[in-house]
Image: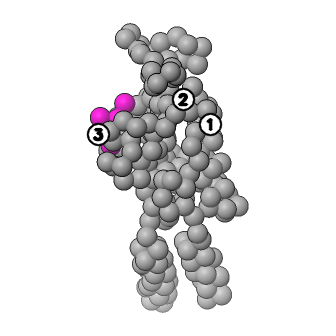
Amino acid sequence: MKKIFLIFSFLLLIYMLWPGPSRISDFKALPDSDKSTLEGDTIQVPEVSAYFSNNFRGFTVPFYLGNYQNLVKLPFPPLRLNYPPEYSWTAIKKHTDSTYLEELVYPLRDSLYVNGFEPFEENGEPKYWGAVKFEIGANIWFTKTTLRFYPSLVWVRLATWFGIILSMALLYRMGKVILK
């Protein structure tokens, strides 16, 4: 039992210390897009980046899922969690328009939120009355994608690892005492 515990502890430590992205600028820009320079999409809110494009959810989320996995280089992809669009005010920033919000997360490590605002269907029809396209310079775009990265500090990961291992050891000892 001790060997299994030591192997698990070592593998968990490797997973938690495995290098990965440290800032939003490590992620690729959305293909065929214009980077947003609107207030709140640049330096005002840390670790936020936004892009205007014609890439819809079916392309955008898998693109960042693959990009995130390539940056982390683990043999498995991050978990993909779906949230209601209203949560974008908490996860991204206040006053973020949203039609979908997904979190790509490696548990006990980092999270990347992908928020999309798509006022039009992929065929060009508006989803609601009053939907407007985004006019940026000479380009007209159908979607806006906002990313927010939540990196974790190495010392926090180490403290978490230590807490997990200590808790497992204490629970094992307490279980042995109770079963006697």
Q: Which residue is mark 1?
A: 31
Q: Which residue is mark 3?
A: 94
Residue 39 lies in the magenta stretch? no
- The Cα atoms of the two marked residues, 1 and 3, are separated by 26 Å
Is label 2 in a helix, a strand or a loop?
A: strand
Q: Quick one: label 1 or label 3, which is nearer the N terminus?
A: 1
Residue 94 left/right relative to 25: left
> How would you rate the neighbour count of disc 2 (Cα within 10 Å): few for under 14, some for 14-19, many for 20 or more?
many
Check if mark 1's residue and mark 2's residue have beta carbons within 8 Å: yes
109 vs 128: above or below? below
Residue 68 pos. (x, y %):
60, 53
Residue 46 pos. (x, y %):
36, 53
> How would you rate the neighbour count of disc 1 (Cα within 10 Å): few for under 14, some for 14-19, many for 20 or more?
few
What's the magenta bit mostly, secondary-structure-wise?
Answer: loop
Residue 1 in sight here: no
Residue for point 33% across, 42% down: 40
Residue positioned most to the left: 94
Q: Which contiguous range is marked in magenta?
A: 93-97
65 vs 71: above or below? above
Name the amino acid type tagged 2: Ser
> How would you rate the neighbour count of disc 3 (Cα within 10 Å): few for under 14, some for 14-19, many for 20 or more?
few
Residue for point 47% across, 88% down: 173
Q: Which residue is mark 2?
A: 53
| Position of the N terminus by quadrant | bottom right
- The Cα atoms of the two marked residues, 2 and 3, are separated by 22 Å
Name the amino acid type tagged 1: Pro
Residue 36 pos. (x, y %):
44, 36
Residue 94 lies in the magenta stretch? yes
* Nearest to viewer (mark 1 / mark 3): 1
* Nearest to viewer (mark 2 / mark 3): 2
Q: Quick one: label 1 or label 2, which is nearer the N terminus?
A: 1
